[in-house]
Image (cartoon, rainbow, N blue to C red):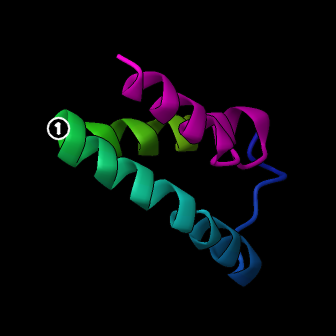
Amino acid sequence: MFKNLRFNRMELAGSLGDLGALLPIAIAMILVNGMNPVGMFFSIAVFFIVSGLYFGVTVPVQPMKVISKRAAKR
């Protein structure tokens, strides 16, 4: 299961590239909706790690944009 996993500088760069979309959305949800930052970032991290291990590929941040738009409508 873990044979195809690799972590090099390209993987690190790709993981940090999505912070430009994730951090502003997460900070806005914390400030506007009063969400718990520890719970939010912990659940995002667990989701990314579990889905990466299961599927073998990283998750794009675009699903987080959908979640924030859905939460902002409530």
The local secondary structure at tag 1 comes to: loop
| Viewer-proximal residue among 42 and 1 | 42
Residue 21 horizontal side relative to residue 13, left or right: left
Q: Main secondary structure of the magenta part?
A: helix
Residue 11 horizontal side relative to residue 28, left or right: right
Residue 54 horizontal side relative to residue 25, left or right: right
**Stretch in magenta:** 51-74
**Residue drawn at x 46%, y 34% as measured from the top left:** 68
Counting from the top left corner in percent of width and height, residue 52 is at 67, 42
**Residue drawn at x 50%, y 31% as measured from the top left:** 69
Counting from the top left corner in percent of width and height, residue 6 is at 75, 64
Placement of 19 over or under 45, stated as above or below: below
Placement of 8 over or under 68, stated as above or below: below
Membership of 63 in magenta stretch? yes
Quadrant of the rendered structure where residue 56 is? top right
Residue 58 horizontal side relative to residue 71, left or right: right
Q: Residue furthest front?
A: 73
Quarter of the image containing the N terminus?
top right
Reading the image, the residue beneath label 1 is 36
Placement of 42 over or under 71, stated as above or below: below
Quadrant of the rendered structure where residue 62 is? top right
| Viewer-proximal residue among 57 and 68 | 68
| Viewer-proximal residue among 41 and 26 | 26
Counting from the top left corner in percent of width and height, residue 72 is at 39, 29
**Residue drawn at x 72%, y 49% as measured from the top left:** 58
Membership of 4 in magenta stretch? no
Counting from the top left corner in percent of width and height, residue 63 is at 63, 35
Q: Residue furthest right?
A: 4
Quarter of the image containing the C terminus?
top left
